[in-house]
Image: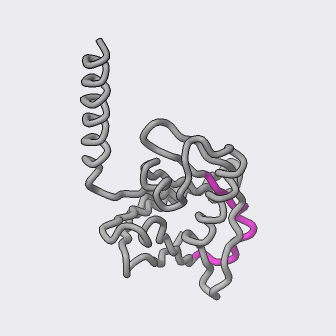
Amino acid sequence: MKVLLSFLLIVTTSVFSLQASAHRYHFGLTNLSVNERTQTLEVSHRFFVADIEKALSISASKELNEAQRQMESYVNSRFQISQENGEVVKLNWVGMEADVHDIWIYQEVPMVDISSKKLNVKQSMLMEIERDQVNTLNVNNGRGTQSYTLKPGESKVGFTL
C-alpha cells in the first residue's frame, strides 16, 4: 500500500510540474476606461498569478494585507500615467482579486485630476523578470477602443483620451 501511495504522489507531483512549466508565454492586460457616470478613469490589470508570485517572491501563505501593500508598491513603480506636461497622475488603489490562474488589480483616478487630454503610459510590469513579456494596453474613451502592445524596451505609449 505504501508503494502505491508513493507512486501516486510521484505521478501527481510530476503532472503538476509539467503543467507549471507549460506556462510558456508571458502576457499582461491593462484596460483604461473612462466611466462617464462616475467621472473616473478606471484602470484594471490582469496577470498570471505565477508570474506575479515570481516577480514579488510572494506565496499564497502570505497575509493578504501584506501582499496587497507589496502589490500596490510594485504596481505604482511599474505602471504610471503622466500628463502632457510630464506630471504623473496619482492613481488611487481600489484593490485586487485572484483566482487559481489570474490576478486582477484595480486603480482609478477622478477625471478632474487629469488636466490634459494627451496622456502617456508606462507599463513595464513583469518586464524585469521575463524578456518576452508582452503587455497589452486597451484604452476605451467612450468613442472606441485603442490597443497598444508594449514589451521590454518599448514600454511607453502616448495617446489622446
Drawn side of residue 133 relative to residue 112, left or right: left
In this rendered view, identify the residue nearer to me: 161 or 151. Answer: 151
The residue at the point 62 percent across, 57 percent down is 71
Question: Which region of the structure is painted magenta?
Answer: 106-117
- In the image, taking residue 17 as reference, residue 28 lies left or right, namely right
Answer left or right for 37 relative to 135: right
Q: Residue at x 68, y 48 (%)?
A: 37
Residue 133 in the image: x percent, y percent?
35, 65
Quadrant where the N terminus sits is top left
Position of residue 23 measured from the top left corner of the image (x, y, whole percent): 29, 49
Q: Residue furthest top?
A: 1
- When asked about the image quadrant of residue 78, the answer is bottom right
Q: Of 51 and 57, which appears nearest the observer? A: 57
Please say if 160 is above or below 72.
below
Residue 43 position by quadrant: bottom right
Q: Residue at x 54, y 60 (%)?
A: 56
Residue 147's quadrant in the figure? bottom left
The residue positioned 66% from the left and 65% from the top of the image is: 73
Task: Indicate the position of residue 156 as horizontal and vertical percent values.
Answer: 45, 78
Residue 107 is covered by the magenta coloring: yes
